[in-house]
Amino acid sequence: MIDVTVAMHRGMVVWPGDPPFSDELWNDLGEGFEATMRRLSLSTHTGTHLDAPSHVIAEGGGVDSVPLSYLVGPVAVVDTGHVRCITQEDLERLLPDEVPPRILFKTRNSHRRLIDEPCFIEDFVALDPSAAQWLVNHGIKVVGIDYYSVDVFHSSGYPAHCILLQSGVAVIEAVRLVDVKPGVYRLIALPLKLLGMDGSPLRVILENLEKD
């Protein structure tokens, strides 16, 4: 099993303008308390996370509306090479006729190890609207990307988000695919049960389906 979740810690990269991750020691065994406990502060889109429809769609459903059956099952890790923006033409070239209903895109973001950089990188690879619509048209239920957005930085209105989320596609962002080989795995990506929330951190696991 391969853990492709970004580790959360103080100083970790977040989307520009989002609240930083922080933790505060609340109770401490060393100070005489019966148990140690910390208080966490983070956004619903910190690290590896699930976007709910309500993230970009007024009156959209929260993370609790995303079927758990979407988030567990066969997934294709697809290496897009060094394309700078994933288009419909790229998908037609890269994807076989038979593909699982879940796709994680390993892009040049992973080849550049952007997810491990200590600061936010703006020129990351994402989807253009034609690619998002192609994925919807082909019945894909989960789309994941190896940096912090399925839309390119400074996109107006988050078009890829809107196309995917309006069609019920589950969007997973900031998946750490640096050391993952292309192929088919079993995805396990469960959000916190946050009622009505626009997103949730995820612990994302890929299970290798090849037998020993």
Image (spheres, rainbow, N blue to C red):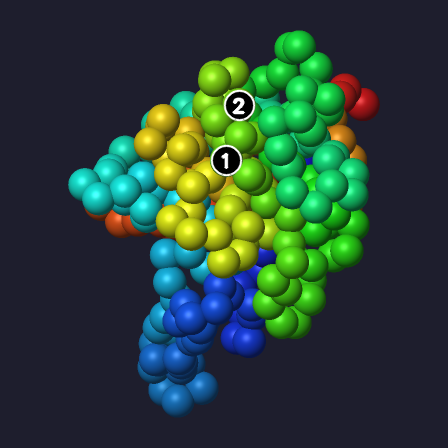
Q: Position of residue 44 (x, y in %)?
A: 37, 56
Residue sitting at x 36%, y 87%? 32
Residue sitting at x 45%, y 86%? 30
Q: Which residue is mark 1?
A: 129
Residue type indicated by callout 2: Trp
Q: Quadrant of the C terminus?
A: top right
Residue sitting at x 40%, y 33%? 163
Q: For this view, does 111 lie left or right of residue 96?
A: right
Residue sitting at x 63%, y 16%? 99
Q: Which residue is mark 2?
A: 134
Residue type indicated by callout 1: Pro
Nearer to the camera, 126 or 119: 126
Q: For this view, does 6 lie left or right of residue 45?
A: right
Q: Position of residue 93 (x, y in %)?
A: 73, 22
Q: Quadrant of residue 131?
A: top right
Q: Quadrant of residue 166?
A: top left
198 over 43 or under it: above or below = above
Label 1: few (<14), some (14–19) or many (≥20) C-alpha neighbours in 10 Å? many
Tag 2 or tag 1, which sits nearer the N-term? 1
Q: For this view, does 59 lie left or right of residue 78?
A: left
Q: Quadrant of residue 95?
A: top right
